Image: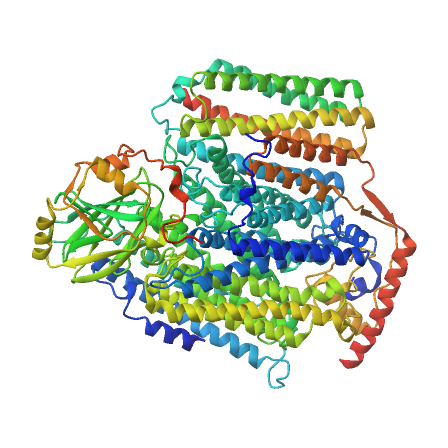
Amino acid sequence: MPATALAFLLSSCNRGILDPVGPVGAAEKQILINSTAIMLAIVIPTMIATVAIAFWFRRGNKKATYRPDWEYSGAIEMVVWAIPALTIMLLGGITWIGSHDLEPSKPLASKVAPLKVEVVSLDWKWLFIYPDQGIATVNQLVVPAGTPVSFRLTSATVWNSFFVPQMGTMIYTMPRMTTRLNLQADRTGSFNGLSSHFSGDGFPGMQFQVQSLPADQFAMWAQGARGQGPALDGRGYAELSKPSSYVKPMTYGAVAPGLFDAIVANKAPPNPVPPPEHNQPVLGSKA
Amino acid sequence: MTTEAATIGLTHGGSEDTGLGHRGPESKSIVVPYGFWLFVLSDMVLFSALFASYGTLVQATDGGPTTHQLFHRDLVAVETIALLLSSFVCGLAMIAAKRANMVWTQAWLIMTGLLGAVFLGIELYEFASMIGEGAGPQRSAFLSSFFTLVGCHGAHVTAGLLWLGTMMAQIWAKGFQQHIVRRLLCFSIFWHALDIIWVGIFTIVYLIGTL
Amino acid sequence: MTLFGRLTWDAIPFNQPIPLITSLVVLLALGGVAVWVTRMKAWPYLWNEYITSTDHKRIGIMYIVLALLMLVRGFADAIMMRAQQSLAIGASQGYLPPEHYNQIFSAHGTIMIFFVAMPFVIGFMNFVVPLQLGVRDVAFPTMNNVSFWLTSSGALLVNLSLFLGEFARTGWLGFPPLSEKAFSPGVGVDYYLVALQISGVGTVLTAVNFVTTILKTRAPGMSYLRMPVFCWTALASNLIMLAAFPVLTVVLGELMLDRYLGFHFFTNDGGGNSMLYMNLIWVWGHPEVYILVLPAFGIYSEVAATFSGKPLFGYRSMVFATLTICIISYMVWLHHFFTMGAGGDVNAVFGIASMIIGIPTGVKIYNWLFTMYGGRVRFTVPIYYLIGFMLTFVIGGLTGVLLAIPPVDFVVHNSLFLVAHFHQVIIGGVVFALMAGYTYWFPKAFGFTLDERLGKAVFWCWFIGFHLAFMPLYVLGFWGATRRMQHIPDPSWAPYLNVAFVGAVIIGLGIVLTVVQLLYSIKTRDQRRDITGDPWDGRTLEWLTLSPPPHYNFAVLPDVHGEEAYWTRKQTAIKMDQLIAEPDYKPIEMPLNTPTGIICAFFASVCGFAVIWYIWWLAVLGLIGAFAVFVWYAWQDEHEHIIPVEEVRANARERRRIRMEHLHELSQST
């Protein structure tokens, strides 16, 4: 069974969280692997000992010594308390350091100024606002490679969780609250993103793509998008807020200033309590 | 006495004192109140979750009324005195019950009930006037948690009064039988426990809220 | 509002084939059973021997029957989910639209935890603890009956949602704001809330009962450190129940106030705070899993000692570890939401606390290992489960410690990695123990053992099925797959999901074989009669009685002179080739049967149903009915009956006769 597990693990080596594209994901992967190795060093011998001891001391084995009254040994107690305790102390140290180093709200060390992105989870799609660039996208996050991205996140309706496995840390999005996250993609490419907190009937449609472009291409994209296509003003936002799922990526060429803060403060149109059709079947998925 | 000999023959009777602490199952007069105490402890946990909710939400007034605008210490003082007195006379009722004195037991129990009803009456008046001035539990999270915490205590008091009425009827009809007195003891534990919770409430909700 | 609140004909799922057909099949099955029972004229038997019984053994059996029935429902949900995830890949939406799939996974979790695992564990504690303590019953037998029926009332309401209305679509914990009225206006969340509130009362009463029983009613001479380890774990589990379930009552009650009366505990407006729900529900939720796993550990301790022919290694260590786990279980709840953004300090503290719980757990594994060391291990079905558990659970513990490290959790929270972890510890830890306990104590309950070969086949189905079903999910979790997905976006996940489906089918085969094993064992029971009452050469007091024990368990409460009360007594008797001297028999006072439980649960169900459907007049009637039952019961003076001394003496002498024969056999063979 450990062999099968190992085979499975090996086959999954280069995907998802095991193929991080930035410093946050890479650090988390390292902690995952180190901790697993430390624990396997204890767990595998224990599993082998379990099978070996049970087999050796089977009733039919006349060679095994039967000690019907042996029920305590101080030395063994000391060892069996010590092994888990020492392991946990080691892992506890890793936990303390790692929890502080990789605290999501902690800005990433970089020579480059961070890109600010504001994230809003709606029913059932992702809105990304670029306050400095004056544009916004739906279900598509474009970032410059090598630049730290500083996120402020919220939800317009119910809880979700913003997660790009290859970039690392996920964080909840909660209505009337702002969470903070810092991530970075060091290489270019296209990565999957999703919501990792169940949010209702349209939840499976909350997939999005992250495009990591070279810095100059990103600047060109941002400039090019400005002024093109629909505007995310009051009416545009009200339209976007209507429940929909599996929404195709789109871009807004203009964004009402302070929209994110208005959403957090519950002052963005429409009324935050959604209309009664909220929980009806999503288009195309009737029984 | 060797273990073997002991095993073979000489120690039946159920009350051997091994010196290690156990003489067999305890009697009902110990077991029943013990179990009831455990239930009261679980009720304390219930209230502590309500206190935790209150503590989290006390500032969440949504622009509506705050603690300083709503609470009246003098009314709370009267409520508190009524409830504490109610507990005191409940204790007197227990003493009378132990002495199997029907008249005084019922008299003190009626007093317990009346004082409890006074407490409830004042509380209902407070709730009604708050709701009347637009500070009902639907107004804000703070008010939801206030009405729930204080209201849950009030609901326990109400249930206690129903229980009290039932107990008074039982004592009247059946006298001071062992199991009836045991139940009365459980009722008095419950009633005193409600006092303890009330001390918590008037401190955390009313005193701190009007500082 | 109409006479029937919001209940209309639309509540019946006429246009939804799966619930409709299931409802018809279940109604037919129930009808069939009712007809069969009537034809056998067995209603009086059922009513007197089980439904109104205050006998902890009968109540324990009823709990386990409830659990096994609900296992079928919970498993049906599981295999539907696996099938959907194998089918709904890429362009296909599968056969379950989101509003159905979302009910199914919510029902699966709710039923498995509240109506399979809890009743199963509580059923064992009911059956075994008084016997192991050497007493006649629990402290409050009537309340025990009420607890069972209130739990059943909750199970009834959850299942009713299949026929009338819908179930919650929020997951098994119903997080707001999704579970608030604004986002879940239907009856589903209300079914969930009401069912759990009713059964929660039953659980708190159980906790009061067992803590009192274990601390205040034990056989003479049984001090704390002479109690069997299963009783210690039962004590710890019930202490947790006592302290955790009131929190659940509060948090679900607050959500009900939001939904029913427009309060603002967790709403998006009015200053509500949904993070408060997350905290309170997990303050309950984490201790809950220890409620389940600690008695499971207790079962393993009993099984390991009995089938190794040795006492449990490190008894005091095990007791200390159990109580440590009991206390620390209250200090770790935040690890369920590291990704909520509490900050480095808070996350680290809770992460470390969560790992610390792994220490006493690890110690237990080693103690079971050293119990087998130096023993003569008999490879019976329970030992298969013990070894299967030891291999499976340590990996589950490993993944658990990984999840306890916040930076790791940041990338696997809510993923299929998490799903695989908790199924690993629940199936490997709790379910295997329940199957082991089922095999181990079955003969005590019914007087014959289960067929061994079929039992081993069931084990292999669970062991192989579990690994096939969940190992692929660890991989998918690393690939970024999250939980509760009605549709799979990435076709490359298909092979793994298909393997998982096969695993689920194999588990299903195991469940079918369990039924087959039961029926076959009943049919061939004469070949495996438990004549002596001690089929496994046991070490604890339940094996002192015949199988099944008389209603009152022991003619005279046994005197306890050391740890392993029964083993010492048995060994002495074998050595001296003589039973203990015949004691003075006395008449025995036992509690009467009572219909209080089922009537109370009836009114609770009526009231609950009425509250769900907004039928207010019926809700009030239900409450009044429940209060009336309470007063009526309290007004009775006769709650006990006396078993005459002749009967006690006759049963005891029969037992002694059988034991003497068995003793002669044993002393000749040693």
B125 vs A128, nearest the viewer: A128
- What x and y, as percent, mark residue B56? 40, 34
Question: Looking at the image, which residue is at 46% across and 64% down?
Answer: C83
The quadrant of the picture occupied by the C terminus of chain C is: bottom right
Residue located farthest toward the top when viewing the structure as drawn: B74
C343 vs A234, nearest the viewer: A234
Question: Residue C662: which quarter of the image?
Answer: bottom right
Residue located farthest toward the bottom when viewing the structure as drawn: A63
- What x and y, as percent, mark residue C91? 34, 62
Q: How many marks?
A: 0
B21 vs C166, nearest the viewer: C166
C65 vs B90, nearest the viewer: C65
The quadrant of the picture occupied by the N terminus of chain C is: top right
* Figure coloring: rainbow
In the rendered image, is residue C53 in sight? yes
Question: Residue A16: which quarter of the image?
Answer: bottom left
Residue located farthest toward the right when viewing the structure as drawn: C646
- What x and y, as percent, mark residue C343? 31, 46
- What x and y, as percent, mark residue C615? 59, 34
In the figure, C660 relative to C7: above or below?
Answer: below
In the rendered image, is residue A76 in sight? no
In the figure, C530 relative to B23: above or below?
Answer: below
In the figure, A226 relative to C86: above or below?
Answer: above
| C22 relative position to C103: left or right | right
